Image: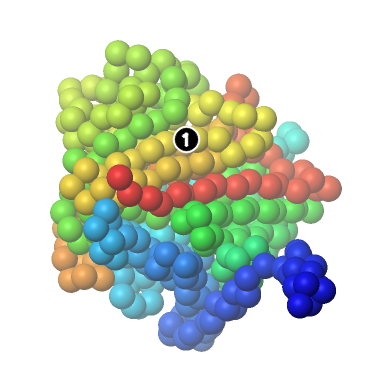
Amino acid sequence: MKLYSLLLAISLIGRTEAVEIPQASPFGQTPDGASVEVFTLTNQHGIKIRAMTYGAIVLSIETPDRNGSLRDIVLGYKTLAEYLAESPYFGAVVGRFGNRIAQGKFKVEGKAYNLTTNNEPGGIKCALHGGLKGFDKVVWHGESLTKNGAQGVKFTYLSKDGEEGYPGNLSVSVTYWLTNDNEWQIDYTATTDKATPVNITQHTYFNLRGEGNGDILGHELTINAAKFIPVSSGLIPTGELRKVAGTPFDFTHAHRIGDRVNNQDEQLKFGGGYDHNWVLKQQNGKLSLAAIVYEPTCGRYLEVLTTEPGLQFYSGNFLDGKLIGKSGSPYQLRNGFCLETQHYPDSPNQPAFPSTILKPGKTLKSSTVYRFSTK
Protein backbone atom coordinates (compact mmCIF):
# COMPACT_ATOMS: atom_id res chain seq x y z
CA MET A 1 0.00 0.00 0.00
CA LYS A 2 2.84 2.39 0.84
CA LEU A 3 4.46 1.71 -2.55
CA TYR A 4 1.11 2.24 -4.31
CA SER A 5 0.56 5.54 -2.49
CA LEU A 6 4.05 6.72 -3.42
CA LEU A 7 3.56 5.85 -7.08
CA LEU A 8 0.16 7.60 -7.08
CA ALA A 9 1.66 10.75 -5.56
CA ILE A 10 4.44 10.76 -8.16
CA SER A 11 1.93 10.32 -10.98
CA LEU A 12 -0.02 13.37 -9.78
CA ILE A 13 2.98 15.70 -9.70
CA GLY A 14 2.69 18.37 -12.41
CA ARG A 15 -0.92 17.58 -13.17
CA THR A 16 -3.56 20.30 -13.13
CA GLU A 17 -7.25 19.79 -12.66
CA ALA A 18 -8.99 19.04 -15.94
CA VAL A 19 -10.94 22.01 -17.26
CA GLU A 20 -13.73 21.74 -19.77
CA ILE A 21 -12.98 23.48 -23.06
CA PRO A 22 -15.35 26.44 -23.63
CA GLN A 23 -17.93 25.70 -26.28
CA ALA A 24 -18.99 28.07 -29.05
CA SER A 25 -22.63 28.61 -29.93
CA PRO A 26 -24.17 30.50 -32.88
CA PHE A 27 -25.27 34.12 -32.38
CA GLY A 28 -26.45 35.05 -35.86
CA GLN A 29 -24.95 36.45 -39.05
CA THR A 30 -23.72 39.83 -40.24
CA PRO A 31 -25.39 41.42 -43.32
CA ASP A 32 -22.59 40.02 -45.52
CA GLY A 33 -23.25 36.48 -44.29
CA ALA A 34 -20.42 36.03 -41.79
CA SER A 35 -21.37 33.73 -38.93
CA VAL A 36 -20.97 35.06 -35.39
CA GLU A 37 -20.33 32.79 -32.40
CA VAL A 38 -20.47 33.19 -28.63
CA PHE A 39 -17.96 31.62 -26.23
CA THR A 40 -18.91 31.11 -22.58
CA LEU A 41 -16.20 31.07 -19.90
CA THR A 42 -16.96 29.88 -16.36
CA ASN A 43 -14.96 29.33 -13.20
CA GLN A 44 -15.31 27.37 -9.94
CA HIS A 45 -17.02 30.27 -8.17
CA GLY A 46 -19.90 30.67 -10.61
CA ILE A 47 -18.56 33.70 -12.47
CA LYS A 48 -19.49 33.60 -16.14
CA ILE A 49 -18.24 35.66 -19.09
CA ARG A 50 -19.88 35.49 -22.52
CA ALA A 51 -18.00 36.98 -25.50
CA MET A 52 -18.73 36.89 -29.22
CA THR A 53 -16.59 36.96 -32.34
CA TYR A 54 -18.21 40.17 -33.62
CA GLY A 55 -16.03 42.94 -32.20
CA ALA A 56 -14.61 40.49 -29.61
CA ILE A 57 -17.52 41.94 -27.62
CA VAL A 58 -18.17 40.89 -24.04
CA LEU A 59 -21.91 40.28 -23.89
CA SER A 60 -22.21 39.65 -20.17
CA ILE A 61 -20.26 39.14 -16.96
CA GLU A 62 -22.11 37.49 -14.08
CA THR A 63 -20.55 37.94 -10.64
CA PRO A 64 -21.88 37.45 -7.10
CA ASP A 65 -22.66 40.22 -4.62
CA ARG A 66 -21.72 39.99 -0.93
CA ASN A 67 -24.71 37.67 -0.38
CA GLY A 68 -23.72 35.35 -3.22
CA SER A 69 -26.44 36.49 -5.63
CA LEU A 70 -25.25 36.49 -9.23
CA ARG A 71 -25.99 39.41 -11.51
CA ASP A 72 -24.81 40.61 -14.92
CA ILE A 73 -22.70 43.74 -14.33
CA VAL A 74 -22.02 44.97 -17.88
CA LEU A 75 -24.16 46.95 -20.30
CA GLY A 76 -25.16 45.56 -23.68
CA TYR A 77 -27.87 44.00 -25.81
CA LYS A 78 -29.61 40.66 -26.23
CA THR A 79 -29.19 40.28 -29.99
CA LEU A 80 -26.55 40.70 -32.68
CA ALA A 81 -28.96 42.87 -34.67
CA GLU A 82 -28.94 45.47 -31.90
CA TYR A 83 -25.13 45.60 -31.86
CA LEU A 84 -25.13 45.97 -35.64
CA ALA A 85 -27.68 48.78 -35.55
CA GLU A 86 -26.14 51.10 -32.95
CA SER A 87 -23.73 50.65 -30.09
CA PRO A 88 -21.45 53.06 -28.18
CA TYR A 89 -18.77 50.33 -28.15
CA PHE A 90 -20.59 48.21 -25.52
CA GLY A 91 -18.12 45.50 -24.44
CA ALA A 92 -15.96 45.81 -27.56
CA VAL A 93 -12.29 45.67 -28.37
CA VAL A 94 -11.47 48.99 -30.03
CA GLY A 95 -8.62 49.78 -32.42
CA ARG A 96 -6.48 49.98 -34.44
CA PHE A 97 -6.10 53.11 -32.29
CA GLY A 98 -8.41 53.38 -29.28
CA ASN A 99 -9.39 56.90 -28.23
CA ARG A 100 -8.93 59.97 -30.46
CA ILE A 101 -6.47 61.13 -33.10
CA ALA A 102 -6.75 64.85 -33.89
CA GLN A 103 -8.21 65.61 -37.34
CA GLY A 104 -7.57 61.96 -38.26
CA LYS A 105 -4.02 62.91 -39.30
CA PHE A 106 -0.54 61.81 -38.28
CA LYS A 107 2.93 61.16 -39.68
CA VAL A 108 5.06 58.04 -39.38
CA GLU A 109 8.66 58.00 -40.60
CA GLY A 110 8.04 61.25 -42.43
CA LYS A 111 4.96 60.07 -44.35
CA ALA A 112 1.57 61.69 -43.75
CA TYR A 113 -1.55 59.59 -43.30
CA ASN A 114 -5.22 60.56 -43.34
CA LEU A 115 -7.64 58.42 -41.35
CA THR A 116 -11.38 58.08 -41.60
CA THR A 117 -12.88 60.65 -39.20
CA ASN A 118 -16.00 59.59 -37.32
CA ASN A 119 -16.36 61.93 -34.34
CA GLU A 120 -16.71 65.70 -33.86
CA PRO A 121 -16.69 66.71 -30.19
CA GLY A 122 -16.86 70.49 -29.93
CA GLY A 123 -17.33 70.59 -33.71
CA ILE A 124 -13.72 69.44 -34.22
CA LYS A 125 -13.17 66.32 -36.34
CA CYS A 126 -11.15 63.35 -35.10
CA ALA A 127 -10.69 59.64 -35.66
CA LEU A 128 -12.23 57.76 -32.72
CA HIS A 129 -11.61 54.11 -31.77
CA GLY A 130 -10.29 53.09 -35.17
CA GLY A 131 -12.76 54.87 -37.48
CA LEU A 132 -16.08 54.01 -39.07
CA LYS A 133 -15.29 50.29 -39.10
CA GLY A 134 -12.82 49.68 -36.32
CA PHE A 135 -12.05 46.43 -34.55
CA ASP A 136 -15.43 46.67 -32.78
CA LYS A 137 -17.28 46.16 -36.09
CA VAL A 138 -15.43 43.21 -37.64
CA VAL A 139 -15.78 39.48 -37.15
CA TRP A 140 -12.77 37.94 -35.39
CA HIS A 141 -11.77 34.28 -35.44
CA GLY A 142 -12.41 32.64 -32.06
CA GLU A 143 -10.54 29.68 -30.55
CA SER A 144 -11.29 27.95 -27.24
CA LEU A 145 -8.41 27.56 -24.77
CA THR A 146 -7.64 26.12 -21.34
CA LYS A 147 -4.59 26.75 -19.16
CA ASN A 148 -3.75 26.12 -15.50
CA GLY A 149 -7.38 25.56 -14.55
CA ALA A 150 -8.61 28.61 -16.47
CA GLN A 151 -10.91 28.81 -19.46
CA GLY A 152 -10.11 31.18 -22.31
CA VAL A 153 -10.92 32.31 -25.81
CA LYS A 154 -8.42 33.72 -28.29
CA PHE A 155 -9.71 36.17 -30.88
CA THR A 156 -7.54 36.89 -33.94
CA TYR A 157 -7.92 39.42 -36.75
CA LEU A 158 -5.86 40.68 -39.68
CA SER A 159 -6.27 44.43 -40.19
CA LYS A 160 -5.15 44.95 -43.77
CA ASP A 161 -2.88 47.69 -45.05
CA GLY A 162 -4.95 50.84 -45.65
CA GLU A 163 -7.90 49.79 -43.48
CA GLU A 164 -9.52 53.03 -42.23
CA GLY A 165 -6.37 54.79 -43.52
CA TYR A 166 -3.82 53.01 -41.30
CA PRO A 167 -0.56 51.70 -42.82
CA GLY A 168 0.57 48.10 -42.66
CA ASN A 169 -0.96 44.66 -42.36
CA LEU A 170 -1.53 44.33 -38.62
CA SER A 171 -1.98 40.84 -37.17
CA VAL A 172 -3.81 41.09 -33.83
CA SER A 173 -4.77 38.63 -31.12
CA VAL A 174 -6.82 39.32 -28.01
CA THR A 175 -7.14 36.52 -25.46
CA TYR A 176 -9.67 36.51 -22.63
CA TRP A 177 -8.98 34.29 -19.62
CA LEU A 178 -11.31 33.65 -16.68
CA THR A 179 -9.33 32.24 -13.77
CA ASN A 180 -10.38 30.60 -10.53
CA ASP A 181 -8.93 33.64 -8.76
CA ASN A 182 -11.93 35.52 -10.19
CA GLU A 183 -9.77 37.41 -12.66
CA TRP A 184 -10.70 38.37 -16.20
CA GLN A 185 -7.30 38.67 -17.85
CA ILE A 186 -6.92 40.21 -21.30
CA ASP A 187 -3.70 39.60 -23.26
CA TYR A 188 -3.07 41.65 -26.39
CA THR A 189 -0.45 40.93 -29.06
CA ALA A 190 0.16 42.50 -32.47
CA THR A 191 2.72 42.48 -35.29
CA THR A 192 2.94 44.57 -38.44
CA ASP A 193 4.78 44.78 -41.77
CA LYS A 194 4.84 48.62 -41.77
CA ALA A 195 5.34 51.11 -38.97
CA THR A 196 1.89 52.01 -37.64
CA PRO A 197 0.26 53.45 -34.51
CA VAL A 198 -1.43 50.81 -32.35
CA ASN A 199 -3.48 51.39 -29.20
CA ILE A 200 -5.90 48.54 -28.50
CA THR A 201 -8.22 48.56 -25.51
CA GLN A 202 -11.40 47.05 -24.08
CA HIS A 203 -14.53 49.21 -23.85
CA THR A 204 -16.83 47.36 -21.46
CA TYR A 205 -19.35 49.50 -19.55
CA PHE A 206 -19.70 48.38 -15.93
CA ASN A 207 -22.43 48.87 -13.36
CA LEU A 208 -21.56 46.88 -10.25
CA ARG A 209 -25.14 47.13 -8.98
CA GLY A 210 -26.20 45.23 -12.08
CA GLU A 211 -26.97 46.09 -15.67
CA GLY A 212 -30.19 48.09 -15.98
CA ASN A 213 -30.17 48.91 -12.27
CA GLY A 214 -29.77 52.68 -12.31
CA ASP A 215 -26.78 54.99 -12.30
CA ILE A 216 -23.20 54.52 -11.16
CA LEU A 217 -22.91 57.75 -9.16
CA GLY A 218 -22.66 55.94 -5.81
CA HIS A 219 -19.73 53.77 -6.91
CA GLU A 220 -16.56 54.63 -5.00
CA LEU A 221 -13.56 55.01 -7.33
CA THR A 222 -9.83 55.07 -6.66
CA ILE A 223 -7.30 55.74 -9.46
CA ASN A 224 -3.62 55.17 -8.80
CA ALA A 225 -2.43 58.30 -10.61
CA ALA A 226 -1.10 61.68 -9.53
CA LYS A 227 -1.62 63.27 -12.96
CA PHE A 228 -4.22 63.34 -15.71
CA ILE A 229 -4.23 64.64 -19.28
CA PRO A 230 -6.29 67.80 -19.90
CA VAL A 231 -8.08 68.11 -23.24
CA SER A 232 -9.34 70.83 -25.54
CA SER A 233 -13.01 71.38 -26.35
CA GLY A 234 -12.50 68.73 -29.05
CA LEU A 235 -11.39 66.23 -26.37
CA ILE A 236 -7.87 66.17 -27.79
CA PRO A 237 -4.95 66.30 -25.31
CA THR A 238 -3.30 69.67 -24.88
CA GLY A 239 0.02 67.91 -24.24
CA GLU A 240 0.06 68.83 -20.54
CA LEU A 241 0.29 66.25 -17.76
CA ARG A 242 -1.57 68.04 -14.97
CA LYS A 243 -1.48 67.18 -11.27
CA VAL A 244 -4.81 65.92 -9.95
CA ALA A 245 -4.28 67.44 -6.49
CA GLY A 246 -6.92 70.04 -5.70
CA THR A 247 -9.08 69.13 -8.72
CA PRO A 248 -12.17 66.95 -9.29
CA PHE A 249 -9.78 64.52 -11.00
CA ASP A 250 -8.10 63.50 -7.74
CA PHE A 251 -9.09 59.89 -7.11
CA THR A 252 -5.91 58.99 -5.25
CA HIS A 253 -8.31 58.34 -2.37
CA ALA A 254 -11.76 56.86 -2.93
CA HIS A 255 -14.50 59.25 -4.05
CA ARG A 256 -18.02 58.56 -5.20
CA ILE A 257 -18.22 59.07 -8.96
CA GLY A 258 -21.17 61.41 -8.45
CA ASP A 259 -19.52 63.63 -5.84
CA ARG A 260 -17.85 66.03 -8.30
CA VAL A 261 -18.92 64.95 -11.78
CA ASN A 262 -21.16 68.03 -12.18
CA ASN A 263 -18.65 70.54 -10.78
CA GLN A 264 -18.19 73.79 -12.70
CA ASP A 265 -14.80 72.70 -14.01
CA GLU A 266 -13.75 73.46 -17.58
CA GLN A 267 -12.43 69.94 -18.15
CA LEU A 268 -15.66 68.36 -16.92
CA LYS A 269 -17.64 70.71 -19.16
CA PHE A 270 -15.58 69.70 -22.19
CA GLY A 271 -16.23 66.01 -21.54
CA GLY A 272 -19.77 66.32 -20.23
CA GLY A 273 -18.31 64.58 -17.19
CA TYR A 274 -15.27 62.36 -16.87
CA ASP A 275 -13.83 61.32 -20.24
CA HIS A 276 -10.11 61.70 -19.59
CA ASN A 277 -6.89 59.74 -19.42
CA TRP A 278 -5.02 59.32 -16.14
CA VAL A 279 -1.23 58.89 -16.10
CA LEU A 280 -0.55 55.63 -14.28
CA LYS A 281 2.38 54.73 -12.09
CA GLN A 282 4.28 52.10 -14.05
CA GLN A 283 6.17 49.04 -12.84
CA ASN A 284 8.55 48.38 -15.77
CA GLY A 285 6.01 46.57 -17.92
CA LYS A 286 4.62 44.47 -15.07
CA LEU A 287 0.98 44.38 -14.07
CA SER A 288 0.33 47.14 -11.55
CA LEU A 289 -2.79 48.37 -9.80
CA ALA A 290 -4.51 51.11 -11.80
CA ALA A 291 -7.94 51.48 -10.19
CA ILE A 292 -10.41 50.14 -7.63
CA VAL A 293 -14.20 50.45 -7.74
CA TYR A 294 -16.46 49.55 -4.81
CA GLU A 295 -20.24 49.56 -4.80
CA PRO A 296 -21.31 49.72 -1.12
CA THR A 297 -24.93 48.64 -1.45
CA CYS A 298 -24.15 45.25 -3.04
CA GLY A 299 -20.53 44.87 -1.94
CA ARG A 300 -19.03 44.19 -5.36
CA TYR A 301 -15.38 45.21 -5.55
CA LEU A 302 -13.45 45.58 -8.81
CA GLU A 303 -9.68 45.97 -9.13
CA VAL A 304 -8.02 46.90 -12.44
CA LEU A 305 -4.38 46.00 -13.08
CA THR A 306 -2.49 46.74 -16.28
CA THR A 307 0.85 47.01 -18.04
CA GLU A 308 -0.42 50.09 -19.92
CA PRO A 309 0.71 53.67 -19.11
CA GLY A 310 -2.78 55.19 -19.09
CA LEU A 311 -6.35 54.67 -17.95
CA GLN A 312 -9.31 56.36 -19.60
CA PHE A 313 -12.16 56.81 -17.14
CA TYR A 314 -15.47 57.49 -18.88
CA SER A 315 -18.57 58.17 -16.80
CA GLY A 316 -21.22 57.31 -19.39
CA ASN A 317 -21.77 60.94 -20.40
CA PHE A 318 -23.37 60.24 -23.78
CA LEU A 319 -25.94 57.69 -22.62
CA ASP A 320 -29.26 59.48 -23.06
CA GLY A 321 -32.06 56.92 -22.69
CA LYS A 322 -32.40 56.16 -26.42
CA LEU A 323 -30.72 52.76 -26.22
CA ILE A 324 -32.64 49.90 -24.59
CA GLY A 325 -30.47 47.37 -22.78
CA LYS A 326 -30.74 43.61 -22.50
CA SER A 327 -32.94 43.77 -19.40
CA GLY A 328 -35.41 46.04 -21.21
CA SER A 329 -34.40 49.22 -19.39
CA PRO A 330 -33.24 52.35 -21.25
CA TYR A 331 -29.64 53.33 -20.60
CA GLN A 332 -29.80 56.79 -19.11
CA LEU A 333 -27.03 59.28 -18.37
CA ARG A 334 -24.31 57.70 -16.20
CA ASN A 335 -25.86 54.23 -16.10
CA GLY A 336 -22.42 52.72 -16.75
CA PHE A 337 -18.72 53.54 -16.56
CA CYS A 338 -15.65 52.44 -18.50
CA LEU A 339 -12.08 51.96 -17.30
CA GLU A 340 -10.08 51.59 -20.52
CA THR A 341 -6.42 50.67 -20.07
CA GLN A 342 -4.42 52.18 -22.92
CA HIS A 343 -1.75 54.54 -24.20
CA TYR A 344 -2.48 58.24 -24.18
CA PRO A 345 -4.95 59.73 -26.70
CA ASP A 346 -3.54 61.36 -29.86
CA SER A 347 -0.10 59.90 -29.11
CA PRO A 348 1.03 59.90 -32.79
CA ASN A 349 0.78 63.73 -32.72
CA GLN A 350 2.25 64.17 -29.23
CA PRO A 351 6.01 63.50 -29.32
CA ALA A 352 6.32 63.88 -25.54
CA PHE A 353 3.87 61.00 -24.94
CA PRO A 354 4.99 57.35 -24.82
CA SER A 355 5.22 56.08 -28.38
CA THR A 356 2.46 53.95 -29.88
CA ILE A 357 4.34 53.22 -33.12
CA LEU A 358 4.73 49.49 -33.74
CA LYS A 359 7.47 48.62 -36.22
CA PRO A 360 8.14 45.51 -38.32
CA GLY A 361 10.05 42.86 -36.41
CA LYS A 362 8.62 44.00 -33.08
CA THR A 363 5.69 42.45 -31.18
CA LEU A 364 3.26 44.47 -29.13
CA LYS A 365 2.42 42.75 -25.86
CA SER A 366 0.05 44.13 -23.24
CA SER A 367 -2.07 42.72 -20.44
CA THR A 368 -4.93 43.94 -18.27
CA VAL A 369 -6.73 42.20 -15.41
CA TYR A 370 -10.18 42.96 -13.99
CA ARG A 371 -10.35 41.22 -10.61
CA PHE A 372 -13.78 40.61 -9.03
CA SER A 373 -14.48 40.22 -5.32
CA THR A 374 -16.81 41.50 -2.58
CA LYS A 375 -16.54 43.18 0.79
Q: Quadrant of the N terminus?
A: bottom right
Answer left or right for 174 relative to 4: left
Q: Relative to 362, does residue 352 appear above or below in the rendering?
A: above
Depth order, front residue of 64/266: 64
Q: How is the image coloured?
A: rainbow
Label 1 is placed on what type of residue?
Answer: Ala
Name, please, the residue furthest toward the front: 1
Q: Quadrant of the rendered structure where residue 219 is?
A: top left
**Residue 154 appears in the figure:** no
Q: Position of residue 341 (x, y in %)?
A: 50, 42
Q: Quadrant of the rendered structure where residue 174 is?
A: bottom right
Callout 1: SS: strand
Q: Position of residue 320 (x, y in %)?
A: 18, 53
Depth order, front residue of 107/25: 25
**Residue 301 appears in the figure:** yes
Depth order, front residue of 254/311: 254
Q: Relative to 129, does residue 357 appear above or below in the rendering?
A: above
Task: Say which residue appears at 29% left-offset and 65% top-offset.
Answer: 70
Depth order, front residue of 293/270: 293
Q: Relative to 76, does residue 262 appear above or below in the rendering?
A: above
Answer left or right for 363 relative to 299: right
Mark 1, residues whose alpha carbon is within 10 Å: few (<14), some, or many (≥20)? many
Q: Position of residue 252 (x, y in %)?
A: 37, 24
Please give the residue where the numbered disc 1 appears in the rendered image: 290
Task: Say which residue appears at 78% left-offset and 72% top-offset.
Answer: 2
Task: Say which residue appears at 47% left-offset and 35% top-offset.
Answer: 290
Count of residue discs: 1
